[in-house]
Image: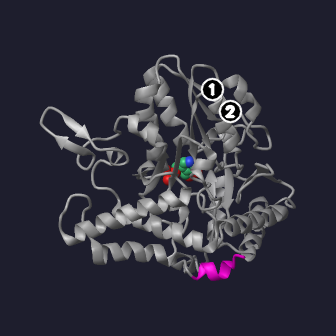
Amino acid sequence: MIDPFAVRGDFPGLKKKVYGKPLIYLDNPATTHKPREVLDAVNNFYANCNSNIHRGAHYLSSHASEMYETARSTVQQFINARSSREVVFTRNATEAINLVAHCFGALWIGEGDEIIISEMEHHSNIIPWQVLCEQKKAVLKVLPFDDSGILQIESLNSLITEKTKIIAVTHVSNVLGTINPVKEIVAAARRFGVAVLIDAAQAVGHLSIDVQDIDCDFLVFSGHKLYAETGIGVLYGKKARLELMPPFQTGGGMVLSVNVHRSQFAKTPYKFEAGTPNIAGALSLKAAMEYVENRGLNAIGEYEQALRGYAESMLLKISSLRIYGTADQKSAITTFSIDGVDSYDAATMLDKLGVAVRSGYFCAEPALKHYNCNGALRAGFVFYNTQQEAETLVRSIANVITMIRG
Ligand code: PLP
């Protein structure tokens, strides 16, 4: 059982007041607040272990290297990867997707090949594939969703051809909240020998993730949406794939030997981690993963979805309000618009009441354009949000509508 009030005690950032009002933070899909354990992990690194990794023989460097590799093992266990060599640290989910588009693309995408994404992707899982298709003269195909926000998986059988090389799809939509049947998508892809990348940016920390069970080739996420620092992300890749792929960036830290004309690259994951990485970020990610595991991912997911259901049941009583995304399998994201009310104006007015929500397209323009919607509001609930906050959100929206309409 999640006690959101006990959880809140761990998050100093939630104590803040805005405009003299208690902060009601519902912009969690954009980034979450950080528990004290995460802040302490970062502070402890710089106060007690600060050093660069992998290069020094001295005490601090070997200690920092060991901590960094322990963080990698924590990630491996958290997503149930077979080996820590399958865990590459990146800056964020966006960089991880770009890495795959670049390195997978260099090896396995040629003229006329096909890549499938879905209509509900975040721009970070659209643009890298568009650019790759332009560079390689490949073809980008789109898996549509229906009006309730459910991917039309049955279309996959006609979309996939012998030219299809990779499907890149989100686990959870950052707009519609839909939890996609990723295992089913991978199974469909497998029948044709097609690789699959799962964008787990909105899934991690809310659903438990098992990459062996999903059987995807790649899975990506950002630490900052999982209560860790910004600037740290993860690319999971099957070892056999990563070993064949060329490096993304080159330089120090990713080589075995160098002479002025030729270099020998290190094995995965180091081959993909050129330059000094975000060491403190990796440690913050370890602390964040341990924090949510201690609270219990199943309990977290159940609590968050129930809170979202409670908020939506109240929102639906507002007659001019429309919710986008009504799938049964839905996470704790509620996106909505109000007839005749500009989303940016409404978010600005909610802010003055202490309620932090996001407005606009949420970097997933095609998903909202599906509904001819030119901007919406989004509330994302996590395990530190309370029923009282959901009630205040709904009351504040009603007040905003009254203020705007007079
Ligand atoms: N994918 C999804 C589904 C997201 O919601 C986001 C961010 O909101 C991203 C990718 C990109 O994450 P980041 O900006 O941390 O790279």
User: How far from the left and from the top, in percent, is residue 248?
Assistant: 35, 39
Residue at screen point 64% across, 36% down: 118
Residue at screen point 49% across, 25% down: 133
User: How far from the left and from the top, in percent, is residue 370?
Assistant: 72, 37
Residue numbers of the magenta segment: 1-9
Residue 397 in view (yes/no): no
User: How far from the left and from the top, in percent, is residue 3?
Assistant: 69, 79
Residue at which label 2 appears: 188
Check disc 1 and give the amino acid type.
Answer: Phe
Q: Secondary structure at mark 1?
A: loop
Residue at which label 1 appears: 192
User: How far from the left and from the top, in percent, is residue 305?
Assistant: 74, 63
How many residues crowd mark 2 within 10 Å: few (<14), some (14–19), many (20+)?
A: some
Q: Quadrant of residue 67?
A: bottom left
- Foreground: 149 or 197? 197
- Vertically, is 127 above or below 95? above
**Does the CB distance between marks 1 and 2 fall below 8 Å?**
yes
How many residues crowd mark 1 within 10 Å: few (<14), some (14–19), many (20+)?
A: some
Mark 1–mark 2 distance (CA, rounded to whole Å): 7 Å
- Foreground: 186 or 283? 186
- Foreground: 255 or 360? 255
Residue 175 in view (yes/no): yes
Q: Is mark 1 within 8 Å of ligand 1?
A: no
Check disc 2 and give the amino acid type.
Answer: Ala
Residue at screen point 65% across, 24% down: 160
Residue at screen point 63% across, 20% down: 161
Q: Quadrant of residue 203?
A: bottom right
Q: Quadrant of the N terminus?
A: bottom right
User: Residue extending furthest front?
Assistant: 82
Q: Secondary structure at mark 2?
A: helix
Q: Quadrant of residue 103?
A: top left
